Image (spheres, grey):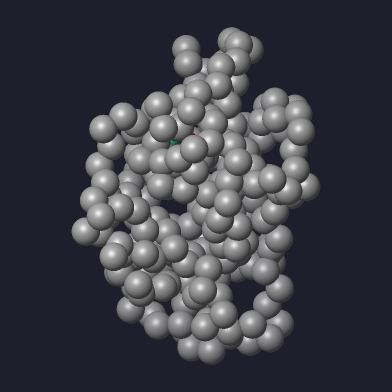
Amino acid sequence: MNWNTLSLLAYVPYSKIPQTCIVEGDKGGYYLGVRIENISYPLTISCLQAACCICLSYGETPKIIYIEHPTHPQIEFWKKEFDCTLISGALTNNIILKEYKEPYITSKIDVLKPLLATAITKNSNFPVSAVLDTNEFSFTGVNIEVSDWSMGLCAERVALSKALASGNIDFSAISVHTLKGEFSSPCGACRQVLKEHLPLSKAKLFHANDTYSEHFINDFLPYNFSSKSLGD
Ligand code: THU
């Protein structure tokens, strides 16, 4: 395993500059995060944000950050947030990355409900869970909150970060569940991100009151921002 191979997993159609990192958790898991750009640039998920939020979603606290070039603008934030050590340069061979993909989940709600307990919602106390499907596999996600609200991630984007870091890019559906609230529904930022990765698929919404609805992601974001001049 080396940085060049891992960098192929980054989604960087706009900058063409791949960035990846690995976060080691306090229980010894290794979590890969890749940069996921968005056509609306500020919605881009950094490799550090992805790796740290994924690590936290598995119940581990980030302890060591492995990154090829220690110049990433978010490094200071994440280092300080969890008192992490930084290791830069070539990767050693003893790193075995956490497997994110799960066998295809047929009964979504049976997974979405217990998953809520793993959300980290110190500020909102509003847990959200998500399952992102390919035809063969599923990727779960929960919302993660850290001291800077803008550095956390929604459940949908944790699931997407896991899927892309696993080399999966063809998605068939996303399911979302909230513990509270009237209508479980992806936020505007997630709609923009989902539109970029699974525009023709459905969002399956499992509402807090045990009702269900499904919607085409395309219908969630009419007149969305797009431009052929970006990503050419
Ligand atoms: N949240 C999600 O996880 N998904 C959404 O689509 C809406 C918002 C989370 C983010 C934050 O942790 C909490 O809900 C309150 O905004």
Query: Residue 55: x and y, percent?
Result: 58, 56
Position of 19 with respect to 119 (left or right) is left
Q: Position of residue 91 (x, y in %)?
A: 58, 85
Quarter residue 31 falls in: bottom right
Residue closest to the eye, 61 or 110: 110
Inspect this view and state whether residue 5 appears: yes
Q: Position of residue 188 (x, y in %)?
A: 34, 33
Relative side of 44 to 157, left or right: left
In depth, the one of 43 and 72 nearer the eye is: 43
The reply to whether residue 126 is visible in this rendering is no
Quarter of the image containing the C terminus?
bottom left
Going 71% across and 60% down the picture, which residue do you hit? 99
Near-viewer residue (222 or 46): 222
In the rendered image, the vertical position of residue 4 relative to residue 8, given as above or below: below
Task: Please tell me whether residue 223 is drawn above or below residue 136 in the rendered image.
Answer: above
Expressed as whole percent of the image width and height from the top left, the position of residue 37 reads 37, 58
- Quarter of image, ligand 1: top left
Decide if residue 105 is on the left or right side of residue 225.
Answer: right
Query: Where the N terminus falls, by quadrant?
Result: bottom right
Q: Residue at x 38, y 80 (%)?
A: 70
